[in-house]
Image (cartoon, rainbow, N blue to C red):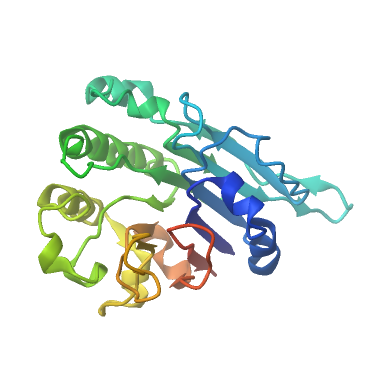
Amino acid sequence: MKLISWNVNGIRAVHNKGIFLPFIAKEKPDVLCLQETKAMQGQAEIDLKEYEEYWNSAVKKGYSGTAIFVKTKINKEGVKKNPVINVLYGLPEKLCKKYKLSGDRYGDPNREGRVIAVELDDFYVVTSYTPNAKPDLSRLQLRHKQWDPAFLEYMQELEKKKPVLFCGDLNVAHTFDDLANPEANIGDHGFTDEEREGIDKIIAAGYIDSFRHVTPKGKGHYTWWSVWSNARARNVGWRIDYWFVSKKLLKRLKSASILSKVMGSDHCPVVLELR
């Protein structure tokens, strides 16, 4: 089973470049998770007959948004079967109230289409587009004290029912190996102690960073590059896109990889394969 996560930075832009559909045709993911779709369902004019599409779009048009595409199965009678049992949009309201996640001066992050989950037979698949702390760190408080703990508690609630796989643009490089110039970026958004602590807590809760499980050490493995200074060609990047795996599913982990050569966005896709 192949699962792919990709921050497309605007699905219409990637599609109009002639990249999106050939990418799906080549990779044939069973589950495709998207972040920063910047669109409502139907706006991109894509036709994927083999997939069921689930979108959580931001209230604000052309902003944020997530989606999950799940490949349908054909049974012995030749009838198309949707493997999705249930779909959950956003963070649960009780967690939003518990963590006072009503928003900051930027708005309510739970109205920005940042989370979507699908329940399959064996597990949940969740994708997240985590709020950016902002260059002036004006959203760091919301990220650290409200969003990160609310999201983790949500994963733990789902875990009580079935194991969880979650992915997405988490907008943080976890370790010094996960960005090209760590010393120069200490304390900057995406590499603050507070943001990195969020990943520490995810791992402490029993979730495995799949890429670092397969490739424990080493620099040069990045998923996002600035559009400035020819950063991508020089591979001066950050690894901020992840697949986390429940310990209950670790024995099924076959591979975890980064498709750094796939263009179309300032992020590249990350892949998880299960036995």
Quarter of the figure with the C terminus: bottom right
x 50%, y 73%: residue: 261
Q: Quadrant of residue 257?
A: bottom left
Question: Which is more toward the observer, 95 or 146?
Answer: 146
| Rendering coords of residue 233 (x, y %) | 40, 75
Q: Nearer the viewer, residue 62 or 203?
A: 62
Report the front residue among 13 and 189: 13
* For residue 161, side relative to residue 4 (left or right): left
On screen, 100 above or below 65? above
Residue at the limit of the structure toward the bottom, as seen here = 218
Residue farthest front in this picture: 229
> Can residue 120 be seen from the camera position used here?
no
Can you give x and y, in whole percent of width and height, for residue 71 in the image?
A: 68, 52
Q: Residue at x 71, y 64 (%)?
A: 25
* Residue 107 higher or lower than 181, as above or below: above
Q: Could you tell whether 260 is left or right of 152 in the image?
A: right
* Residue 2 in which image quadrant: bottom right
Q: Quadrant of residue 208?
A: bottom left
Residue at 40%, 44% (x, y): give it: 128
Residue visible at 36% across and 69% down? 230
Label total for image: 0
The x and y percentages for residue 24 are 66, 60
Q: Which quadrant would the N terminus be assigned to in this image?
A: bottom right
Q: Horizontal placement of 46 versus 93: left or right? A: right
Considering depth in this image, is 64 or 5 the residue closer to the camera?
64
Q: Position of residue 260 (x, y in %)?
A: 46, 71
Residue 52 visible at all: yes
